[in-house]
Amino acid sequence: LFKSKALELGEKLLPAFNTPTGIPRGVINLGRQSRMNASSVSRLCSGTSWSWGWASAGSSILAEFGTLHLEFVHLTELSNNPIYTEKVMNIRKLLSKIEKPHGLYPNFLSPVSGNWVQHHVSIGGLGDSFYEYLIKSYLMSDKTDEEAKDMYYSALQDSHRVAVHDSDGVSSDDLSAAAAAPSLHE
């Protein structure tokens, strides 16, 4: 029962990827098509997708489209249909081609142009899950997904480089050594 429901949901999610870049939009109507007046039918039909109204310039959100990898690879394994893996590998392909400000991935990407809508980067809200899923993808692949591992460690290095700065009298090496020291409470 769960397998058939997962496959049914996966199939219903595929229309969200029908964008010029293949980057999925954040919201999709999973319901059945219903009769509506002409002005509202475009959003209410089954399979129609759109971006969150609050997302910058109609963009897709890194933490959302960046966390589909594990589930969609698993859907391919369950269904023997490569379409799911192809969809998420297209996301990776696009992310590897576009410039990353300071080596990091901004939170908002246009599903139409494939460009960052703004350069706001966060390893917190709107971005955190993307980074978590990179390392999870590597580990869940039995450590064969080298691309996910490389993307994760590259972003980790760049986030450290961008966020950690020496202040007068204390270097980041001193802080690293202090963090590695045994706790007094152990």
Image (spheres, helix red, strand yellow):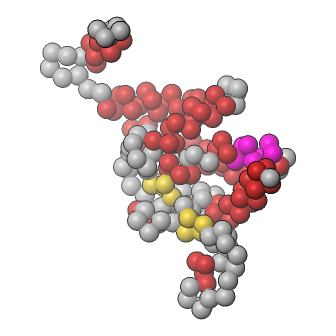
Q: Residue furthest left?
A: 168
Picture layout, residue 170 above or below residue 111:
above
| Residue 82 can be seen in this image | no
Q: What percent of the width, then of the height, locates residue 120?
A: 36, 49
Total labels: the figure holds 0
Residue nearer the viewer, 20 or 159 = 159
Residue nearer the viewer, 97 or 19 = 19
Residue 33 highlighted magenta (yes or no): no
Q: Residue furthest right?
A: 80
Q: Residue at x 49, y 54 (%)?
A: 61
Q: What percent of the width, then of the height, locates residue 9?
A: 71, 59
Main SS type for the magenta part?
Answer: helix
Q: Quadrant of the C terminus?
A: top left
Q: Residue at x 67, y 72 (%)?
A: 31
Q: Residue at x 30, y 27 (%)?
A: 164
Picture layout, residue 161 above or below residue 67:
above
Q: What percent of the width, then of the height, locates residue 147?
A: 62, 33
Please state if 118 lies on the left or on the right of 79 as rendered: left
Q: Which residues, given as a range, are shown in magenta?
A: 72-78
Please state if 156 lies on the left or on the right of 166 as rendered: right
Q: Residue at x 69, y 52 (%)?
A: 87
Q: What percent of the width, then of the height, locates residue 55?
A: 43, 62
Picture layout, residue 74 above or below residue 158:
below
| Residue 138 can be seen in this image | yes
